[in-house]
Image (cartoon, rainbow, N blue to C red):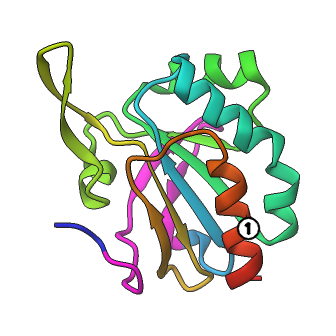
Amino acid sequence: MAIAVGSTAPDFELEATNGEIVKLSDLKGKNIVIYFYPKDMTPGCTTEACDFRDQHERFAEVNAVVLGISPDPIASHQKFMEKYGIPFLLLSDPDHKAAEAFDVWKLKKNFGNEYMGIERSTFVLDKEGMVAKEWRKVKVKGHVDEALEFIKQNLN
């Protein structure tokens, strides 16, 4: 079931790269950018993470927390963060419970193979935890700027 703009985001608790458990509902009072990505260290995911990294201070200026989520284990996330200097938390969703709650765990096809995986998607939540904007099947180029601009225009 897809979540809708204007609805309360599904809550989750996931392990983060800082060793803590992040509970989404504990972040109320801040704008939140949640981006789901398929896999650490892959070209598109690296570009997206580095784009969020490069705009990190600008997101902080508009009271926004960025969270990256993939099924990768914490050890993989930590290597990814260290290699690329990622300043925000990456969350591990190995059982894809958060991905399913946000309806981004999808059947994918690649070179004739079918498998389940993350559909690259981004959600912006307002300070009350409501879904203010969603992007599905994200094309990486220019996407981070678009998300930042949305927050500036609508949630600041």
The residue nearer to you, when weighing 68 against 76, is: 68
The residue nearer to you, when weighing 22 against 105, is: 105
Report x, y in % for residue 27.
60, 70
Q: Residue at x 25, y 38 (%)?
A: 95
Q: Which residues are magenta?
A: 4-25
Q: Which of the 4 image quarters holds residue 41? A: top right
Report x, y in % for residue 85.
79, 26
Q: Which amino acid type is marked by label 1?
A: Glu
Q: Which residue is mark 1?
A: 149
Q: Which of the 4 image quarters holds residue 81? A: top right
Work out whether 67 lies above or below 85: below
Give left or right: position of 65 versus 6.
right
Give left or right: position of 103 versus 83.
left
Report x, y in % for residue 66.
65, 54
Q: Report if residue 31 lies within the magenta region.
A: no
Can residue 155 be seen in this snapshot?
A: no
The residue nearer to you, when weighing 16 against 41, is: 41
Looking at the rendered structure, the number of numbered marks drawn on it comes to 1
Q: Which of the 4 image quarters holds residue 94? A: top left
